[in-house]
């Protein structure tokens, strides 16, 4: 179950054993789990390649409905980015400022000293 990606809590609940027991087994069998995951990753890569090849074939034969194509393409791009280690989503963080915070920032800008500088080109 650990090899398939189940959490310690899920395995403990399903097998009716303590989470500590599962954690000990996971630690003791780390190498076996690592090899199993490596094998599973290879199988998934093969299945993905076959699915993409079928999708290309269906696309060439106009067998993919127009409504499905954007969804399938989006999923394919997302999974490719994930495979390449790129982010699959961007989380935008927006900060709201109060009127008092804006006034304080404007006040600090007014207090800044203005420095005049002369700029000239330097020949190399």
Image (spheres, rainbow, N blue to C red):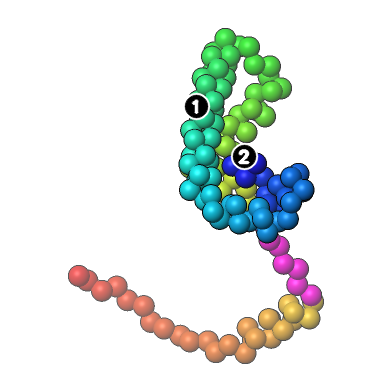
| 2 vs 1, front mark | 2
Q: Position of residue 103 (x, y in %)?
A: 74, 81
Q: Which label was assigned to residue 4?
A: 2
- Residue farthest along the left direction in this orientation: 124
Judging by the rendered image, the residue that carries numbered circle 1 is: 46
x and y, in percent, of residue 112 in the image: 58, 88
Residue 4 makes an appearance in the image? yes
Quadrant housing residue 44: top right
Secondary structure at numbered mark 1: helix
Q: What range is drawn magenta here?
A: 92-98
Residue 107 drawn at (x, y percent): 69, 86
The answer to whether the residues at label 2 and label 1 have Cβ atoms under 8 Å apart is: no
Residue at image coords 50%, 27%: 46
In the picture, measured across the screen, residue 24 lies left or right of residue 94, that is left
Residue 23 in the image: above or below residue 124: above
User: In the image, 100: left or right of 109?
Assistant: right
In terms of depth relative to the viewer, which is nearer, 90 or 23? 23
On screen, residue 122 versus residue 70, left or right, reads: left
Q: Image height check: is 14 above or below 107?
A: above
- Residue at screen point 59% across, 45% down: 88
Q: Is residue 86 visible?
A: no
Q: Position of residue 95 (x, y in %)?
A: 72, 67
**What residue is shown at x 60% (from left), y 52% (from top)?**
25
Relative placement, left or right, of 4 versus 57 is right
Q: Is residue 14 above or below residue 76?
A: below
Q: Nearer the viewer, residue 41 or 35?
A: 35
Magenta-drawn stretch contains 29:
no
Sequence-wise, the earlier of marks 2 and 1 is 2
- Residue at horizontal 58 percent and vertical 32 percent from the top: 76
Q: Label 1: how many residues lie within 10 Å, few (<14), some (14-19) or many (20+)?
A: few
Q: Main secondary structure of the magenta part?
A: loop
Q: In this view, which residue lies farthest toward the right?
A: 99
């Amino acid at each position: 179950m650990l090899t398939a990606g189940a959490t310690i809590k899920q395995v403990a609940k399903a097998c009716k054993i303590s989470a500590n027991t599962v954690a000990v087994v996971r630690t003791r069998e780390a190498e076996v789990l690592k090899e199993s995951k490596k094998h599973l990753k290879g199988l998934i890569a093969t299945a993905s390649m076959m699915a993409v090849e079928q999708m290309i074939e269906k696309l060439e034969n106009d067998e993919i409905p127009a409504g499905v194509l954007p969804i399938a393409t989006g999923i394919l791009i997302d999974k490719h980015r994930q495979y390449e280690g790129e982010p699959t989503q961007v989380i935008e963080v927006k900060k709201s400022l109060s009127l008092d915070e804006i006034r304080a920032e404007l006040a600090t800008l007014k207090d800044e000293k203005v420095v005049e500088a002369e700029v000239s080109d330097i020949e190399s």
